[in-house]
């Protein structure tokens, strides 16, 4: 609509007016005043923001348009008008930011201040290695000077390794957010890493023997499971034990390799393994709990045997005495795949069931539970998934009895497959 003073004066509290040809400009009414507001999508985080221009009638329609034009131009240049205004208002109290604050320093602050206190395992080390090897020419540049084009060129140059480009983009976006939150960059500094190539970097999946694995979520067939179980003795004891626990418990690899003796208990209905919430993938969720895992069949045999010979508390221990790395199982399996070219002169048996990873056994266990008739809630509890929505908030039943029942049925089914020979 066009601006009309009479309409503006009669505007009811809580209502607002918009104006043709001036997107984002509005006049909002409260009980005591009429305010010019500019609403816009921030170029920094793509969220809707607003900033006040002034109050009518002290600021007339022509003056509001002039100010709206300035704010709109600033936004199109990549600045957040509201953040800029707040920074000016802060004045002398604002953190002093200098152009000497380099990308290298920013990434280091992110590693030390955020990643190391919050990330588990080797993740901070891996991110540090990635920053050190991939930032290239922008490493020594002032962080505040990085342009959209520079961010684009860095990521575009990594299209040959899209998964790595996605990871770098995500971590640099987090690093810029951390620096902005800490006041080490001006508050109107755009975080280009959140904006450039959004949705345009996509991994093609791992290429094995010339075949892409993109989008392939492997579930082993009954015949493949039988072949694998009969072939397991060809692997090292540690790798075979790890793969067995994947199938018999449906737990995650990180949980398996970090089993401690103190987590194993003899209870009235048998042997139990209780994974502390802090060790699970769900540790950040308030509604998550410790993961209760009944050990039946081969899972019980593996855990009891390893507990007897373990020198420390970890039953899958590394040479240094801590928990073994999860990759030991994956690498041990890959070494026996027919397409593995590591140490080509070294003769070793090649596994007849190909193109799968240890995590696919967790997916296979979940699929088998469904085929046996296991209720959804029980199967999800066995895998340690947090139920979504209000169900996860209000349903606090532990399903211990049901876990043991259905994992016992799964164990029996796996033993049948191990004995069954595929039809010729």
Image (tube, rainbow, N blue to C red):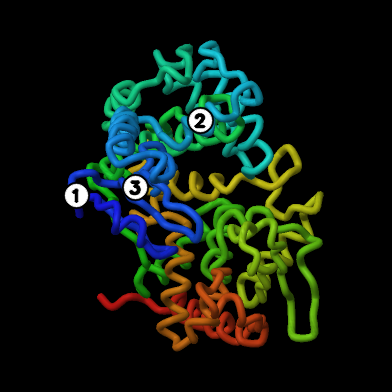
- Image: 419 above or below 144: below
Q: Is residue 205 visible?
A: yes
Q: Name the residue under label 1.
A: 20
| CA gap, disc 1 and disc 2 | 31 Å
Q: Which residue is drawn at 41% across and 40% down?
A: 58
Q: Is residue 69 left or right of residue 11?
A: left
Q: Which of 280 and 396 is in front in this view?
A: 396
Q: Which residue is drawn at 31% across and 37% down?
A: 68
- Mark closest to the chain's N terminus, 2 or 3: 2
Q: How crowded is mark 1: few (under 14 residues within 10 Å), some or many (20 or more)?
A: few
- Mark closest to the chain's N terminus, 1 or 2: 1
Q: Residue at x 61, y 62 (%)?
A: 285
Q: How crowded is mark 2: few (under 14 residues within 10 Å), some or many (20 or more)?
A: many
Q: Is residue 9 left or right of residue 105?
A: left
Q: Mark 2 points at which residue?
A: 187
- The quadrant in which the C terminus is found is bottom left
- Image: 96 above or below 126: above
- Mark closest to the chain's N terminus, 1 or 3: 1
Frontmost of labels 1 and 3 is 1
Q: Nearer the viewer, residue 294 or 202?
A: 202
Frontmost of labels 2 and 3 is 2
Residue 338: which numbered mark, if any?
3
Q: Quadrant of residue 240?
A: bottom right
Q: What is the x, y in percent for residue 260? A: 75, 57
Where disc 3 sits, the SS reads loop
Asked if disc 2 and disc 3 are in contact, CB closer than 8 Å, the reply is no
Q: What is the x, y in percent for residue 291? A: 66, 69
Residue 284: which numbered mark, if any?
none
């Amino acid at each position: 609509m066009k601006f009309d003073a009479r309409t503006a004066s009669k505007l009811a509290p809580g209502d607002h007016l918009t104006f043709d040809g001036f997107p984002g400009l509005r006049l909002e009414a409260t009980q005591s005043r009429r305010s010019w507001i500019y609403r816009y999508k921030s170029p920094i985080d793509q969220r809707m923001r607003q900033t006040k221009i002034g109050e009518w009638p002290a600021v007339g329609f022509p003056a509001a348009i002039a100010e709206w034009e300035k704010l709109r131009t600033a936004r199109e240049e990549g600045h957040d008008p509201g953040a800029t205004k707040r920074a000016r208002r802060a004045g002398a109290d604002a953190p002093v930011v200098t152009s000497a604050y380099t990308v290298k320093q920013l990434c280091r602050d992110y590693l030390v201040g955020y990643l190391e206190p919050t990330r588990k395992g080797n993740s901070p080390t891996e991110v540090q290695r990635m920053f050190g090897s991939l930032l290239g020419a922008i490493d020594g540049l002032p962080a505040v000077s990085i342009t959209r084009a520079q961010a684009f060129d860095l990521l575009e140059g990594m299209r040959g390794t899209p998964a790595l480009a996605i990871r770098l983009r995500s971590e640099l976006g987090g690093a810029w957010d951390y620096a902005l939150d800490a006041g080490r960059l001006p508050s109107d500094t755009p975080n280009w890493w959140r904006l450039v190539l959004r949705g345009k970097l996509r991994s093609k999946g791992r290429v094995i023997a010339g075949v892409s694995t993109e989008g392939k979520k492997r579930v082993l067939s009954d015949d493949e499971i039988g072949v694998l179980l009969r072939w397991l003795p060809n692997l090292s004891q540690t790798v075979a034990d790890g793969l067995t626990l994947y199938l018999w418990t449906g737990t995650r690899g990180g949980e398996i390799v970090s089993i401690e003796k103190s987590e194993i208990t003899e209870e009235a209905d048998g042997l139990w393994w209780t994974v502390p919430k802090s060790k699970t993938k769900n540790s950040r969720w308030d509604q998550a709990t410790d993961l209760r895992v009944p050990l039946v069949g081969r899972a019980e045999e593996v855990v009891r045997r390893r507990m007897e010979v373990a020198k420390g508390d970890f039953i899958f221990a590394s040479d240094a005495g801590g928990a073994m790395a999860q990759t030991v199982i994956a690498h041990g399996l890959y070494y026996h795949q027919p397409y593995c070219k590591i140490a080509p002169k070294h003769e070793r048996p090649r596994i007849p069931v190909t193109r799968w990873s240890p995590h696919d056994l967790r997916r296979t266990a979940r699929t088998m539970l469904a085929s046996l008739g296991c209720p959804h809630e029980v199967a999800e509890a066995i895998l340690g998934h947090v139920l979504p929505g209000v169900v996860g908030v209000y349903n606090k039943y532990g399903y211990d009895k049901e876990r043991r029942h259905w994992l016992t049925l799964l164990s029996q089914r796996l033993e049948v497959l191990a004995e069954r020979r595929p039809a010729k």
